[in-house]
Image (cartoon, helix red, strand yellow):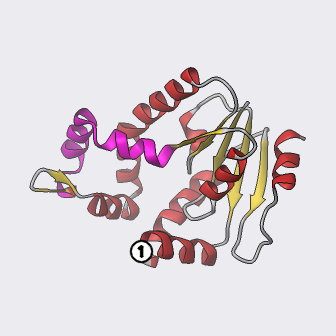
Amino acid sequence: MIIGVYGTIGAGKTTISNKIKKLKFKVVNADKISRDVLNSRDIEKQIKDAFPNAFIENNLNRAKLRKIISEDQNSLNKLNSIVWPEIKNQISLLIQTNPGNIVIDAALLPELGLEVDKYIRVKANLLTTLLRVKKRDKKPFKETYSIYKQQKQRIKKYDLNNEVIIINDIWTKSITYKQLHKKIFK
């Protein structure tokens, strides 16, 4: 079984994925894969050609790149067109070489077009998102809000039949394994 966990920045996707992992699933984290993809020479060259201002002395400055894409939807789309095909290839390879139950953790997972048995959308309100990301990444609220807003607009367009929603706000009672099991296998 392949489960896809998606949602906006700071929604708690990794928390839910790690809970699903305890139900004997292998976790594939798209953020980790994307960091590796960004380090590949071919992808880095393409990014340098598209975003020369994101480089300092021939080194990719991820904070600068993040700022560029958080302020402009076209820049985000351009970066995604460079990076996502390789992320999709890497995830597909992991699925092929690791038979069994897999949970894929990726913010905008449906856009990768992977075969997924069930989607879990993790939702959190804006306040929760801002506080979590500030604590975790030390990102300014304005930057987090911009990413959150872009992702939320994209997620609204999804029309998934095999989806369950989990609310994961800071005041939501902790989600139990029994509740997860019921949502996944109902």
| For residue 176, side relative to residue 57 (left or right) | right
Can residue 157 be seen in this snapshot? Answer: no
Q: What secondary structure predominates along the stretch shown in magenta?
A: helix
| For residue 69, side relative to residue 64 (left or right) | right
Q: Which residues are magenta?
A: 30-53
Judge by depth and name the residue closer to the eye, 75 or 17.
17
Query: Magenta segment: does it hold 180?
Result: no
Q: Position of residue 122 (x, y in %)?
A: 69, 57
Residue at 48% across / 70% down in the picture?
A: 136
Quadrant for the N terminus in the image: top right
Residue at 59% across / 25% down in the picture?
A: 98
Can residue 110 be seen in this snapshot? Answer: yes
Quarter assignment of residue 175: bottom right
Query: Magenta segment: does it hold 37?
Result: yes
Packing grade of label 1 (10 A; few <14, some 14-19, many >=20) is few
Amino acid identity at mark 1: Lys
Judge by depth and name the residue closer to the eye, 58 or 96.
96
| For residue 110, side relative to residue 135 (left or right) | right
| For residue 4, side relative to residue 186 (left or right) | left
Residue at 39% across / 52% down in the picture?
A: 76
**Above or below for 141 versus 120:** below
Q: Position of residue 96 (x, y in %)?
A: 56, 21
**Above or below for 6 versus 104:** below
Judge by depth and name the residue closer to the eye, 48 or 27.
27
Residue identifier under label 1: 138
**Above or below for 15 versus 144:** above
Q: Secondary structure at mark 1?
A: loop
Count of marks overlaid on the render: 1
Residue at 33% across / 64% down in the picture?
A: 67
